[in-house]
Amino acid sequence: MTVLRTIDLTKKFGDFAALDGVNIEVGEGEIYGFIGPNGAGKSTTLRVLLGILKATDGRAEIFGKDSWKDAVEIHKRVAYVPGDISLWPNLTGGEVIDLFVKLRGGNNLDRRQELIQKFDLDPTKKCRTYSKGNRQKVALIAAFSSDVDLYVLDEPTSGLDPLMERVFQEYAMEAKKQGKSILLSSHILSEVEKLCDKVAIIREGKIIETGTLKELRHLTGTILLVETKEPIAGLEELKGVSGIQQKGSALSFQVETSEVDHVIRYISRFGVSRIESSPPTLEELFMRHYEGTGKAVESGAGGES
Amino acid sequence: MTRHLFDGTGTLIRFVLRRDRLRLPIWLVSFAAVSAIIALAFVGLYQNQEERQAMAETMRNPAMTAMVGPGYGLDNYTVGAMTAHEMLLMTAVVVGLMSILLVTRHTRTDEEDGRIEMVRSLPVGRLSNLLSILLVLTGANIVLALLTAFSLTALGIDSVDLEGSLVYGAALGATGMVFAGIAAVCAQLSPNARTALGLSITVLLLAYMIRAIGDVTNETLSWFSPLGWILRSEAYVNNYWWPILLTVAGAVLLMALALYLNSIRDLGSGFLPSRAGKANASRSLLSPFGLVFRLQRTGLIAWAVGLLLIGASYGSVLGDLELFFEDIDLMQQMIVQAEGFSLTEQFIPVLMAVMAILGTIPVLLAVLKLKTEEKNDRLEHVVSRSVSRNHVMGSYLGMSVLTGFIMLSLAALGLGLVGNAMMDEQLSLGMYYGSAMAYLPAMLAMIGLAVVLLGWAPNLASAMWLYLAFSFFVIYLGGLFQFPEWVGKLTPFGYVSEIPIEEMNYLNAVMLTVVAVILTAIGFVGFNRRDIGR
């Protein structure tokens, strides 16, 4: 069942199109990773979905309702953690958590205390004294102590230490187990890789890749690490090979799935002494899209060697 | 080790001056300019010795003593004596405020934002930062003293001689130094910048109040306040230097104390314990309006006390008005001449207009707070939860209307209660209250306009301040400059009935309210349609 979706969502600020026909769809019990460079339109998408910004064109729906018109109704079942969290300097963290839970409509799970302990937050301190990580904890505690069906999280761990990051991941997984959905915008690709069922990559307001990690990897191909007795000649001219890098005495490169057989046959002529294959990491996927397919090959090969 | 405590102070002094290269000159020139303008204004307002003597008579009452300090030279109230007597204390309070703001900015605020840490990691002495800002402030206050003294002397007024001007300027400068020292000590005691600022300003207000009570009841008490000391300099009459030297000595001691405290304190900590706040929110906070109210509570209380005091201080002179006005033509031009009413009654609408427009400042602050919250990305927290846009805007609107009601009520109460206590014939409190409440519809219209801007053009919302300034100009000075009548109708305050000399015009009041409601509705529509964010 679809919990959240956008159809050709477009948002313009003056002439600038921050979002240009964005289509994403999050199903029930799914953790959906939303990745892309700074300024690509991640936060704008989330803000439109929450009815904070009004879409110029296209549709944004949560629970089948219009995210602008039915914002108040939708928000009773949605928890949102914004990217830049600014809190009221003269209120304490505890007060802000209570306020946030109450403003959602009071459907709290009564596990505030547990969350405060797990996230190791001092709720009696004024927000002015909180670091970025602590402000994020306040927002996360408020989010996870509400009983909602969808979490919309904008880079929720960018200020947390690795220990707290793990606490966050536990709660995210727990929510997923209970059939809840999460839309997670993130820069921390290892986290997305660990948590997410599906991923969408956004760049300059457009979704350029979407699907399960497995699908994306399949599309991209395999990473080969090869050490040969003789240097491999003419590798860059080979069809389906990209991202060639010298790694010590070995060469690392990416091969498109359809060309693997052909490439293996070719390199075997040079006397293979070591070969390792691995699926591309999300980072490699991301970098490929980020830098543009053609450019990635050139800069990867030329810059490193 | 100790040799290096002050390394790099010279460089830091230049750095402070560089950062304040606009701020500092603006402060200093303003003081010199305002002092000179007021002295000149006194020359213009009171044409001869008799008029000044009439003014001197109104000074002979406890309320004025509490406000501006004990009278001196009242038997021969020259322009110099008048300027120094009526202006020194008020100006000194603002000079003290300047010192407090500058010192806190360069000490605790810098410390809280992590800038001091950066500076300290360089080969710079541990006390250099504090010493540099104290030296800058000392220098600034000396410049302030000389600048004020010379600009007053340059006016060429007979009774404003060089020595008196030097005493006057030095009294201001000494006050600035003392409060620089106080702010520096408070910065060491407090756990954070906000507390440091709050503590310093509390000391300033206490100094004013202790002196006020002391001057009226028991002069010994005034000696506990630095503001009480400098008032004893009696510029242009007796020109005593010793109170100024005493004040400067006190300032130096305070500065030394601040340096000592700084040397035994860890960066980022204070000597006063930082109290733990509440772990849970009280019920009153847990609603959009609760949040809006909580964020503005302190400001509301401060403004409420302020309006009450202004009302009370106007009230304290009501009793002397008749005496005062008979002699001064200029003042008579400012108020409407009406048959069958006493001068006091004719003056009440003028006072009410001033207080109503002043009271509109917190009213606009309350509604425009929405924009501050939006700019700081905090409105997002509220609208992303199940709170409608109408509910959000409604909370700010409600706060604003409540503020307006409180401001007018307290202004009327202060004026009425103190005024009646000072006068032989009493006016009814209901009349005072009605006269103030007549301004509520005009306030509502101002709020409505602010809501329209917030809904449709939030970036233009600050234009409300210009409009308010325009309103003040037209209403307060309109009579003096003899503006044509239609100019007064360009502001909602121009449609308010001048009670008690006019009957309450209910039609106008209803019309203003209707306009306010329509404007507010238009603003709500806009707010429901627009993006939230910067």
Image (tube, coloured by chain):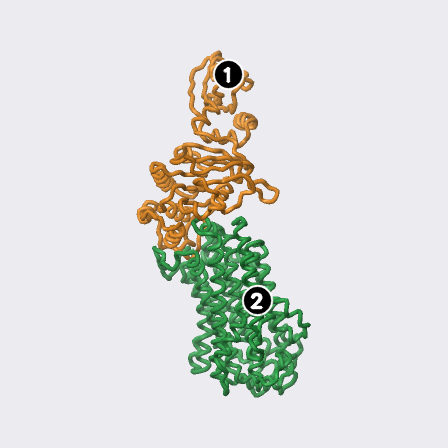
- Check the image and report above or below for A252 versus B317: above
In this view of the protein, which residue sits in the foreground, B142 or A277?
A: A277
**Judging from the image, what secondary structure is the residue with disc 1 in?**
loop
Q: Residue at x 38, y 48 (%)?
A: A142
Q: Residues within 10 Å of mark 2 (few under 14, many from 20)?
A: many
Residue B306 percent across, percent down from the top left: 48, 71
Measured as percent of width and height from the top left, residue B504 is found at 55, 75
**Residue tagged by mark 2?**
B512
Query: What color does chain A have in the rendering?
Result: orange
Q: Residue at x 37, y 42 (%)?
A: A164
Chain B tint as drawn: green
Task: Compare residues A195 and B161 and report the one nearer the observer.
Answer: A195
Please state if B45 lies on the left or on the right of A169 as rendered.
Answer: right
Reply above or below: B133 against B162.
Answer: above
* Residue indicated by mark 1: A231
Q: Are marks 2 and 1 on the same chain?
A: no
Q: Residue B221 shows which numbered tag?
A: none
Residue B12 location (% of width, % of height): 53, 56
Question: Total label count?
Answer: 2
Q: Chain of mark 2?
A: B
Query: How dense is the environment of label 1, judged by Cα within 10 Å: few (below 14), some, or many (20 and up)?
Result: some
The furthest residue to the top:
A269
Secondary structure beneath disc 2? helix
Could you tell me the amino acid type at mark 2? Leu
Q: Amino acid at mark 1?
A: Pro
C-alpha gap between disc 2 and disc 1: 89 Å
Q: Of the residues tagged 2 and 1, which is closer to the observer?
A: 2
Q: Chain of mark 1?
A: A
Outermost residue toward the front in this view: B507
Residue A249 as seen in the image, left or right of residue A111: right
**Mark 2 in CB contact with mark 1 (< 8 angstroms):** no
The residue closer to the viewer here, A10 or A269, is: A10
